[in-house]
Image (cartoon, rainbow, N blue to C red):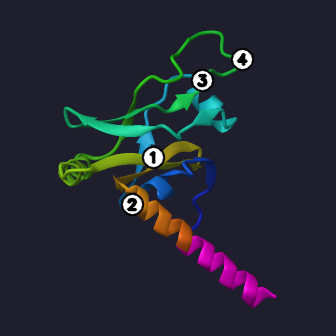
Amino acid sequence: MKKNDKLELIATNRRAKFDYEIFDTYIAGIELKGPEIKSIRQRHVNINSAFVKIENGEAFIYGMQINPYKFNTSIILDPFRKRKLLLNKNEIKKIESQIEKKGFTIIVLELFLKNGWAKLKIAIAKGKKKYNKKEYLKERDIKRETKREIGM
């Protein structure tokens, strides 16, 4: 990204890094209709249950909720409809080859505006096991305690 790019974080999937082990990340545009971008700018969006599927050489996002724009009078859209992601063919082929491995999936990490355009940060990820989550919590508690002791 360039220095003068204006970034505005809209939504994050905070559970993603806890539930998944992240391997590779990509930035993708979203194909939106009419008033959806206005709802995004007002932060009426939820990406916590969103995931990405590749169908016929195109990437689509499912489970992303964009609530209807309050002042919309023309188009009534389903808040949970599937939306096309804007990635180039080489990126889609690379992602497709990575998720063919067992247990890998494509998740959404964050939604942001870059120079007024809605972008998604997606990641190739693998679900963590329950014991991995416990280890993560233990490590986090140890780090927190050491910071507390050093600070006092």
Label 4 close to label 3 by CB (< 8 Å): yes
Disc 3 to disc 1, how far (Cα)? 22 Å
> Of label 4 and label 3, which has the lower sequence position?
3
Label 3 close to label 2 by CB (< 8 Å): no
The residue range painted magenta reads 139-152
Disc 4 to disc 2, how far (Cα)? 38 Å
> Of label 1 and label 4, which has the lower sequence position?
4
Residue type at mark 1 is Val
> Of label 4 and label 2, which has the lower sequence position?
2
Q: Which residue is mark 1?
A: 108
Residue type at mark 4 is Phe
Q: Which residue is mark 4?
A: 71
Circle 2: is it few (<14), some (14-19), or many (20+) Cα within 10 Å?
many
Q: Mark 4 or mark 2: which is in front? A: 2
Q: In the image, 89: left or right of 46?
A: left
Q: Which residue is mark 2?
A: 22
Residue type at mark 2 is Ile
